[in-house]
Image: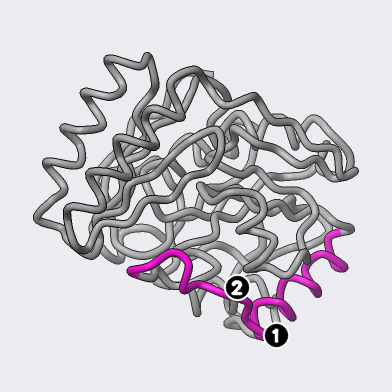
Amino acid sequence: MGQKLARHVPEGDLPTPPILDPARMAIFLDLDGVLAPISPRPGDVGPDAVRREVLSRLMAETGGRVAVVSGRALADIDRILEGVIEAVGAVHGLVRRCGDGTIQSPPPPPGMEEAIGAISLFAEQEPGLLIEPKGVAVALHFRGAPALGGPCRELADRLAARLDLQIQLGDHVVELRGPGPDKGAAVRAFMSETPFHGFAPVFLGDDLTDEAGFRAAQDLGGMAVIVGARRPTVATHALPDVAAVLAWLGGPATQSDGASRL
């Protein structure tokens, strides 16, 4: 299938997703901005009783066809979600824990240790910056110092060129990683396996890295839902915020009686 072109979608131009149908859908969820509000400090995001209840019920209703596909490290995802979700694509899909618990992860790329050292030194000298090492990748967050976005990207460009690493841009974050799967590849891999195979994939995301997941879900006959502020996207549906996501995942009882099914 041909590559879908991203288009700018003003607020309100995309419809809300149809009522969730657990019997037909396989659900793929980003974490930050989708299951949890964006925090200036990633470490401040923690477990939440409402989120845990919604995800636990969703896992039961879908027969386990729920996966979280996030830029966070696997251990961090488990910490926040309290181990409720078994199938996880971590570090934007570079690390994947299958539904049977098997973990697929590449070794850290050559140059990653040097990149972490250089980024750490830079962050120590600039208040408001946060570094997030992930083993196979490292992220530099500048949400606390947005004026430093340009210098952060320039540093990442220099390190990527010198150390043969890839750059991953996101919302107030720049990341260095080795080659390997993205979120779309993670969705495709899960969809080839039990219990996801044969169901309609639905991907919910909010950031640039989620576009690959959106494309994969649509290519496989499913649906893409962008959450939050609009930007160029290939998503087909939209939800305004985390509260709306949790309400949609909560099922028909929390949604309008007039909504249609997928």
Q: Please determine whether, in this image, residue 84 is positioned above or below residue 96.
A: below
Determine whether 70 is above or below 111 in the image: below
Residue lying at 76% horizontally and 59% vertically, measured from the top left:
85
Q: Answer with the quarter of the image where residue 19 lies.
A: bottom right
Q: Is residue 86 left or right of residue 194?
A: left
Residues in magenta? 40-62
Task: Classify residue 66 by image quadrant.
Answer: bottom right
Residue 160 belongs to magenta span? no
Name the residue beneath numbered marker 2: 248
What quarter of the picture does the N terminus occupy?
A: top right
Q: Position of residue 172 (x, y in %)?
A: 27, 53
Residue 95 quadrant: top right
Within the magenta stretch, is there residue 51? yes
Neighbours of disc 2 within 10 Å: few (<14), some (14-19), many (20+) = many
Query: Distance between the Cα atoms at labels 1 and 2?
Result: 9 Å
Q: Is residue 160 or residue 235 the one in the foreground? A: 160
Amino acid type, label 1: Ala
Q: Main secondary structure of the magenta part?
A: helix
Residue visible at 80% across and 40% down in the picture: 98
Depth check: 10 or 108 in front? 108
SS label for mark 2:
helix
How does the figure colour the protein chain or chains? one colour
- Amino acid of disc 2: Trp
Q: Which residue is mark 1?
A: 253
The residue at the point 20 percent across, 42 percent down is 152
Q: Tag 1's secondary structure?
A: helix
The location of residue 262, given as percent across then percent down, is 65, 56
User: Residue at position x 74%, y 50% from top?
Assistant: 26
